[in-house]
Amino acid sequence: MRTRPRMLPLLAALSLVLVTPTAAAASTASGHPGEPELLASGLDGGSGSTVGPDGALYVTEGVAGRLTRIDPETGDTTVVADCLPPRVAPVGGAIDVAFLHGTAYVLVTLVSPEVGGSDVAGIYRIGGPHTCTVVADLGTWSLQHPPDTDFVVPVGLQFALAPYRGGFLVTDGHHNRVLFVMLDGSVHQVVQLPNVVPTGLDVRGSKVWLAEAGPVPHRPKDGQALTFSGTTSPELRKVASGAPLLVDVELGCGGRLFGLAQGEFPVGQPPATPAIAGTGQLRVADDGHFRVVVDQLDRPTSLEFIGDTAYVVTLDGEVWRIPDVCG
């Protein structure tokens, strides 16, 4: 196995999540969306999310090792599964969720012995409230297939999960690559990237949208969205740029691409320093640039759309509803 001294890829990914939680706040920048409303709170380490087959929100709780369902109208929460490996480091645990053929799958990262844990870092299938089964061991695969990029943690830091062609696409924000994972546990690398910190994903048919946060200091011009198709030597094309510390992308109402930015990185601070409080933004791709739609979000982590309403999960375990985003 190889390890290399430069720490920027890992620390850039860690800066997405190593923060001191504070209450989320938001204000509209364009005048069109409705005022953001707090839908739910008290999640234990809110991170990734998806809209399930039943139309509800599903959010991972990395600290507690849970998957939770949230009613998008009432905010009522129900624990769907409590059997996922809990977080053992300041970052990691259950970090994202996706549905395939009506079944929930959760991406879990940084829980293996290499980082002080005792569990498998990979994709888990949810079979019931207390039944979580490993279908792909991504930590071991990463150990056996080191990336062609600088790294510190040999098991990587898997960040986002999206169903694709009967399997899943997975981003690794530390190893700077995108993987394709089948339900039989087989894994192959789709693309190896330079130090760009790939984060969120969205998929429509064969087309994939990929978010990149960019290296420290996470300049807005480095926060960009790309698109590609296929899993064999795909050609990546830039769609939009200009989002500070981009953590997610999502196709929303009208088929427009939205980006979720954590916010402004404090200039001169070392890697792993969080964005400045209250500088997170919801942006929309407009002629190759991400234009602000809603600002003053406090360190958001993931984005979903139900109709013209956006739902934003934050690091401190809150879910905010933003109505009439396309108004």
Image (cartoon, rainbow, N blue to C red):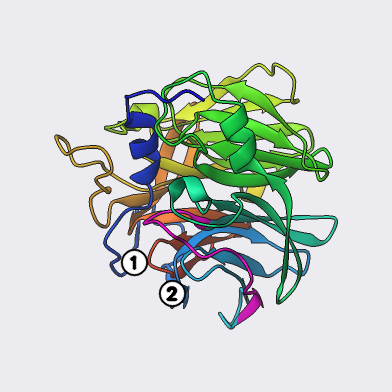
Q: Is residue 201 left or right of residue 136?
A: left
Furthest toward the left, the residue is 268
Above or below, 235 against 218 in this view is above
* Contact between labelled residues 1 and 2, with CB atoms less than 8 Å apart: yes
- Residue that label 1 marks: 24
Q: What is the total number of numbered labels drawn onto the structure image?
A: 2
Graded by Cα atoms within 10 Å as few (under 14), some (14 to 19) or many (20 or more), the crowding at tag 2 reads: some
In the rendered image, residue 79, in percent from the top left (x then y), is placed at: 62, 78
CA separation in Å, label 2 and label 1: 9 Å
Most foreground residue, 77 or 263:
77
Instruction: Give yes or no for residue 90 being in the magenta stretch.
Output: yes
**Residue at the (72%, 63%) spot, across then down:** 52
| Nearest to the observer: residue 27 or residue 39 | 39
Residue at image position (38%, 27%) is 222
Which quarter of the picture shows residue 26? bottom left
Name which residue lies at 38% across and 50% down: 281
Q: Secondary structure at mark 1?
A: loop
Q: Quadrant of the C terminus?
A: bottom right
Question: Tag 2: residue type?
Answer: Leu
At x 42%, y 62%, the residue is: 314
Sooner in the amino-acid sequence: mark 2 or mark 1:
1
User: Foreground residue, 186 or 18?
Assistant: 186
| Mark 2 secondary-structure assignment | strand
6 horizontally vs 92: left or right? left
Is residue 54 a member of the stretch shown in magenta? Answer: no
Q: Name the mark on residue 38.
A: 2
Range of residues picked out in magenta: 78-93
Residue situated in front as seen by the camera: 111 or 325: 111
- Specify the quadrant of the image occupied by residue 101: bottom right
In this rendering, does residue 259 appear at all?
A: no
| Main SS class of the magenta portion in the image | loop
Instruction: Residue 310: give x, y in percent of width and height.
Output: 54, 59
